[in-house]
Amino acid sequence: METPASTCRPTARRRGGRRTATALVAIAAALPLIGTATPSASAAPPMSVPMDPGDSAKFAKLNRQIEKLDKEYGGDLAKLKDAQYAAQKALSKSNDLQKDLVEARNLVAQLAATQYMTGGEDPTVSFLADANPSDMLSNATLVSHLAQNKAAKVAQIQKLVDDQLAARKKAQLKMTELKKEIKDLKSRKAQIQQLVKKYKPESPSIGMGGVTPRMLKVKNTLDLEMGPFPTIGCVRHTGDPQDHGTGHACDFMVTTGGVMAGGSAKAQGDRTAEYAISHASALGIKYVIWRQRIYDMRSPGWRMMENRGGVTANHYDHVHVSVF
C-alpha cells in the first residue's frame, strides 16, 4: 500500500522536472534562432543573432579590391593590409563563437528531449532515485556536479550569445574601416599613380642577396647616416614576407632577441624612421613601420596598426623600410 509521502513525492518531483524541462525547451527553441534570421521589431528575442549576414562574402569582395589595388599602386599596401588583418581576425572570432553557439544549442535540445521522454523528470534526479543505497553518497555528489554543470552550461550559453553579438559588431566595424581605407586610396589614385610612375619598378638581383638596387641604396644610406645597427635583415621568404620576399624591404634592428627598444635604442629607431620619411622622395621609400605604426607615402601620416602579439611582430625592436 502506498503512503501519502510516496504518492506526493514523485508528483512534486515531476512538477519540478516539468518546470526545468519547460525552461530547457524554451531555451532550445530560442537558440535555433541564432544564425537563422535577423529579429523583427515585433518579435525580437534577446538571443537572436543573424549568422554571418553576408559578412564573409563582403570580406571576400574587399579582398579582391585589395589585390587589384596592390598591382596598380606599386606593390604591398601594408597600411591597407593591416586593416584587412584586423577585419579577418574579428570575422574569424565571430564565426568561431557562432560554431560554439550551435554546439550549445544542440546540448540544450538534447537535455530538453531527455526530460520530455522521461515524463518531464530531471534525469539526474531519476539517476539518484534508482541508485543502490550503498552508492548513495558518491551518486549524490555526481548528481550535484551534473546539476551544477547544467546550470553553468545554460549561463555559458547566454554569455556566448552576448560575446557573439559583440564580435559580430566588431567584425562589421572593422570591415567598415577597411572600406574607408580602400575608398581613401581610390580617391588618391592620380597622386599615387604619379608617385609610382616616378619610381620605375625594379627586379630582384642576383649576387646581392636578392635585394633591389634601390633597396640596397636605402640600406647603405641609412646604415651610413643612422648606424651602426645590431643587425640589418633584408631578404626572407618565411612567415609573411611581403616586400622582404622580393628584395624591396629591410629591417633595421635597434635591439636583438625580441627586446623592446628603450633609451638610446628607441632614440635610434625614432631617428631612423624620421630620416627615412623625410628623405622618402629622394630615396624611393614606399612606407616605414616603427613601434606598431605605419607611415605610407601613398597615404601620408602615421597610423596605428593592429596588435600582432609580440615585440618583433609589432616592430618595437626594429624599423621596417620598404621601397618602390
Image (spheres, rainbow, N blue to C red):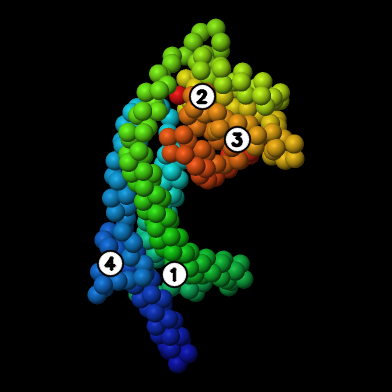
Q: Secondary structure at mark 4?
A: loop
Residue 164, above or below 318: below
Q: Residue at x 32, y 39 (%)?
A: 186
Work out whether mark 3 precedes mark 2 in sequence or the reverse, and give the earlier one: 3
Position of the N terminus by quadrant: bottom left
Asked whether residue 238 is in view, the answer is no
Q: Earlier in the sequence, mark 1 or mark 4?
A: 4
Q: Position of residue 74 (x, y in %)?
A: 39, 27
Judged by depth in the image, the label closer to the viewer, 3 or 4, is 3
- Label 1, residues with CA under 10 Å away: few <14, some 14-19, many ≥20: some
| Residue beneath disc 2 | 282
Label 2, label 1: how far apart the Cα atoms are: 78 Å
User: How far apart are the alpha carbons under marks 3 and 4?
Assistant: 52 Å
Mark-to-mark CA distance, 3 and 2 = 14 Å
Residue type at numbered disc 3: Glu
Q: Earlier in the sequence, mark 2 or mark 1?
A: 1
Instruction: Say left or right for 306 vs 219.
Output: left
Residue at (52%, 45%) from the top-left corner?
Answer: 304
Q: Disc 4 marks which amino acid?
A: Pro
First in residue order: circle 3 vs circle 4: 4
Task: Looking at the image, tell me whether mark 3 or mark 1 is earlier in sequence order.
Answer: 1
